[in-house]
């Protein structure tokens, strides 16, 4: 897999609480994997027109007049959003360059984050996002409204930050043998990042211990073949609970796992394992779809 | 996506509800007026407007667009209703819906790209003229009261918004209706009222299977009407969707809209309503009133039904003059007035396409015919222009007695005569070289013209050779898909 060789690390910055941590982790990832960093700010047009009139009549050339009115109104708002975003981007870029990165690209795009990612994804190796954006400022828990959509639209790994930056030392890989977790295992064994002294824990939670043990052995052979050492742990029990417990006991920094492998409707009715994990863990995440 | 669905419905609740109510108030007179155009009871248009608005709010592809019974479709039903009655109209409505769903699955919305700006302008102007003309029966052979009332109504519609404070709160078309109704009622003026025009709804609509024999004869009666309704309905809907896209700077799902229009018409036909489509005027009113989401369309439909079912007694005493004033307003608002000024400044080709579209529509009362005419004339102009991009340069080499023709440009049906005209068949030379590597042969007429030139030259005794025929005929292959690739387009256009 040449996944990290050609693409950019894209960091989604919006000036929210987690924006700084997104930038820090993106800088760290960019350095570790020698991939250039791109900063993205999206300008969302959720404009609600204030100048509404309930005259209900049709005047001559009403369409042209209305178009002029609406575009004038939105132009001012867009200009402000662009200016604000530019400032966020410039600050982020300065910080990245101060951290020793060169060729940092800073871009603004109109539209929602998922739309922007969909347009850009062919150039990307990895996307770094905060677990919640401006809409959830100050909330202790909660996930960004666009996070799941953003993860679902692209087929690149997504790094999700949940807290301020701390040099990562320990990685936990949650392996359940599903196709997406296979992909995650592949990423783990191929990415330069994991060959730079990170301690890798592979945890498998299954209904019976033998099955979990088998998965650990599979992972072990793949990782060993790639020249990586690992600590394996087979557990029985409820997955979210067991994994978050393991994270705490072993002081894990990053959780690597397959994510959102079921359809959206499934998640709607049965609850999504990924959402559950994102909500209840305190680590950063690397999700692979 | 669930997220965007939620945004579509609940992203703008307050404005959507208010806008929906404003739209509903204006929809009532329109639905009644269009029923009268089609020659059916007002309740047919009112039930249709309810069903279409509510269904399209759920299944349509353009949030914030208003669909209901419309003039464009009503005009197509007149003879069907006159000759065969309401039940056949219901069948035609359902069949039109089925055809629209099929059109959606066949991606026919993509053909909208053939409709130029001039054709669109012609379409709207023609629609405005037809709506106005449909009011004329209400304005001929009537007492002066009707003229006075209509003029007063128009005055209220256009001037009431200038009244401070309440002017922008109350929809002026509604004020017009209320005021004129009160005047007529209290002064006991004897003019026609809505109640004179046929049944108004007094109950909620019920599911009804049309009462016609289901056989081939019925099909042969309704099919021509259904296909017209389906085409005109989709044309106006997609056109309106474009207008709303532009106004709100957002995108719509045209395929979903086609299928949605079909489902809405089937629903309308099954509760005794006539066919409809998107309404350009009402959709603009909705946007102007702040409506952006699906909720606005839903509210418009539901509120309309509540209004007419509970107020049918009051509605029946509304004078027709108030309605006529509203429809004249719709006509004025739909017409593109700048297009008249632009007749002088726009290229003759653009103006003639627009005018031809209008004339054919007003003549046939069928917007589809006008659009086809507009597209046809526009295409002829385009072919005429393209054929100007053809040039043949010639050179003569005395030593070898060789005449060389270098063909640059587009060779196709319309430029093939011009192409032949560049060659000097009277010149007696040993050899003729025709270099076509910078030419494009777009159709077999173009290729035949080249054959003709070669044969003629050979007859005169010249040895003819052609250079670069492979490159030149690449365009002939009809492989439209390759034209999507930039490098292929580059290859074809590279010569120019």
Image (cartoon, rainbow, N blue to C red):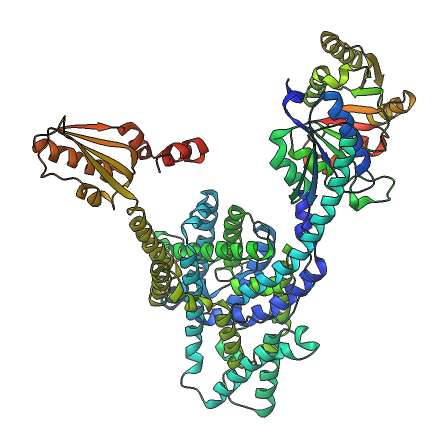
Q: How far across and how far down the image is residue B487, in percent?
A: 44, 31
Side of B153 where B116 appears, left or right: left
Whether residue A149 is visible: yes
In the orientation shown, which residue stands out farthest toward the bottom?
Answer: B187
A167 or B143: which is nearer to us? A167
Give the x, y percent position of residue A180. Answer: 69, 23
| Of B274 and B155, the residue lying toward us | B155
Along the line of sight, the residue nearer the viewer: B24 or A207? B24
Q: Is residue B263 left or right of residue A19?
A: left
Quarter occupied by residue B177: bottom right
Number of numbered callouts drawn:
0
Q: Is residue B321 found left or right of A166 in the rendered image?
A: left
Please tell me which residue is depicted at 42% across the width and 61% down the height of the picture.
Answer: B88
| Residue B45 location (% of width, % of height) | 51, 66
In the rendering, at what x and y percent does residue B269 appear? 50, 58
Q: Name the image quarter holding the C terminus of chain B.
A: top left
Residue B365 location, quadrant: bottom left
Which residue is outermost to the right? A249
Can you name the residue that lies furthest to the front here? Answer: B399
Residue A198, relative to residue B177: is it above or below?
above
Quadrant assignment for the N terminus of chain B: top right
Image quarter for residue B185? bottom right
Query: Compared to B168, does B366 lie above or below?
Result: above
Q: Is residue B205 visible to us here?
A: no
Above or below — where is A280 with respect to A233?
below
Residue at 66%, 46% in the rendered image: B4
Observer-nearest of B372 and A16: A16
């Amino acid at each position: 897999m040449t996944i990290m060789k050609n693409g950019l690390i894209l960091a989604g910055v919006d000036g929210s609480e987690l924006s700084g941590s997104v930038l820090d982790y993106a800088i760290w990832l960019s350095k570790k994997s020698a991939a250039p960093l791109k900063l993205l700010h999206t300008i969302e047009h959720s404009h609600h027109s204030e100048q509404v009139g309930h005259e209900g009549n049709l005047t001559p050339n009403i369409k042209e007049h209305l178009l002029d009115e609406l575009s004038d109104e939105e132009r001012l708002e867009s200009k402000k959003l662009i200016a604000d975003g530019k400032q966020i981007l410039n600050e982020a870029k300065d910080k990245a360059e101060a951290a020793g990165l060169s060729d940092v690209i800073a871009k603004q795009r109109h539209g929602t984050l998922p739309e922007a990612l969909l347009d850009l994804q062919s150039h990307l190796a990895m996307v770094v996002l905060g677990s919640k954006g401006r809409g959830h400022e100050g909330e202790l828990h909660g996930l960004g409204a666009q996070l799941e959509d953003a993860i679902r639209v692209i087929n690149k790994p997504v790094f999700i930050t949940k807290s301020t930056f701390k040099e990562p030392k320990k990685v936990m890989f949650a392996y359940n043998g599903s196709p997406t977790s296979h992909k995650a295992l592949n990423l783990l064994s191929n990415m330069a990042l994991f060959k730079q002294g990170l301690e890798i824990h592979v945890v498998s939670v299954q209904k019976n211990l033998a099955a979990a043990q088998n998965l650990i052995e599979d992972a072990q052979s793949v990782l060993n073949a790639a020249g990586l050492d690992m600590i394996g742990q087979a557990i029985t029990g409820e997955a979210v609970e067991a994994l978050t417990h393991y994270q705490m006991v072993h002081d894990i920094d990053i959780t690597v796992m397959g994510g959102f492998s079921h359809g959206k409707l499934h998640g709607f009715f049965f609850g999504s394992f990924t959402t559950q994990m994102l909500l209840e863990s305190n680590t950063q995440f690397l999700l692979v779809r | 996506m669930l997220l965007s669905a939620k945004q579509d419905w609940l992203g703008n609740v307050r404005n959507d509800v208010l806008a929906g109510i404003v739209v509903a108030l204006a929809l009532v007179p329109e639905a009644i007026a269009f029923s009268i155009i089609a020659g059916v009871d007002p309740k047919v248009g009112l039930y249709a407007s309810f069903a279409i608005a509510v269904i399209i709010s759920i299944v349509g592809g353009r949030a914030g667009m208003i669909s209901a019974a419309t003039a464009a479709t009503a005009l197509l039903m007149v003879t069907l209703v006159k000759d065969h009655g309401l039940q056949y109209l219901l069948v035609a409505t359902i069949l039109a819906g089925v055809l629209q769903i099929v059109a959606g699955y066949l991606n026919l919305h993509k053909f909208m790209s053939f409709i130029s700006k001039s054709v669109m302008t012609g379409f709207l102007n023609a629609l405005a003229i037809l709506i106005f003309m449909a009011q004329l029966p209400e304005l001929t052979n009537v007492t002066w009261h009707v003229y006075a009332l209509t003029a007063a109504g128009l005055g209220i519609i256009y001037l009431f918004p200038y009244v401070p404070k309440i002017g922008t709160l109350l929809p002026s078309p509604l004020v017009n209706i209320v005021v004129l109704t009160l005047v007529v009622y209290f002064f006991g003026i004897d003019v026609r009222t809505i109640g004179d025009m046929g049944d108004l709804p007094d109950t909620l609509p019920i599911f009804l299977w049309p009462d016609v024999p289901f056989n081939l004869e019925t099909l042969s009666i309704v099919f021509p009407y259904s296909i017209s309704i389906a085409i005109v309905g989709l044309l106006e809907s997609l056109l309106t969707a474009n207008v709303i896209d532009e106004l709100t700077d957002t995108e719509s799902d045209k395929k979903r809209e086609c299928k949605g229009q079909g489902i809405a018409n089937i629903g309308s036909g099954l509760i005794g309503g006539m066919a409809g489509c998107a309404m350009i005027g009402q959709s603009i009113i909705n946007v102007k009133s702040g409506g952006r989401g699906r909720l606005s369309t839903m509210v418009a439909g539901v509120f309309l039904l509540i209004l007419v079912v509970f107020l049918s007694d009051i509605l029946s005493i509304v004078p027709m003059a108030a309605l006529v004033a509203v429809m004249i307003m719709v006509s004025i608002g739909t017409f593109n007035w700048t297009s008249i000024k632009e007749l002088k400044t726009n290229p003759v080709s653009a103006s003639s396409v627009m005018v031809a579209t209008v004339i054919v529509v007003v003549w046939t009362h069928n917007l589809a015919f006008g659009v086809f005419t507009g597209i046809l004339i526009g295409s002829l102009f385009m072919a005429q222009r393209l054929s100007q991009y053809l040039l043949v340069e010639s050179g003569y080499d005395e030593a070898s007695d060789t005449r060389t023709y270098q063909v640059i440009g587009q060779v196709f049906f319309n430029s093939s005569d011009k192409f032949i005209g560049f060659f000097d068949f009277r010149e007696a030379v040993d050899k003729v070289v025709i270099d076509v590597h910078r030419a494009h042969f777009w159709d077999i007429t173009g290729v035949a013209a080249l054959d003709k030139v070669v044969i003629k030259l050979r007859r005169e005794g010249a040895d003819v050779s052609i250079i670069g025929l492979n490159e030149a005929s690449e365009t002939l292959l009809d492989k439209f898909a390759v034209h999507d690739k930039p490098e292929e387009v580059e290859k074809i256009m590279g010569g120019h």
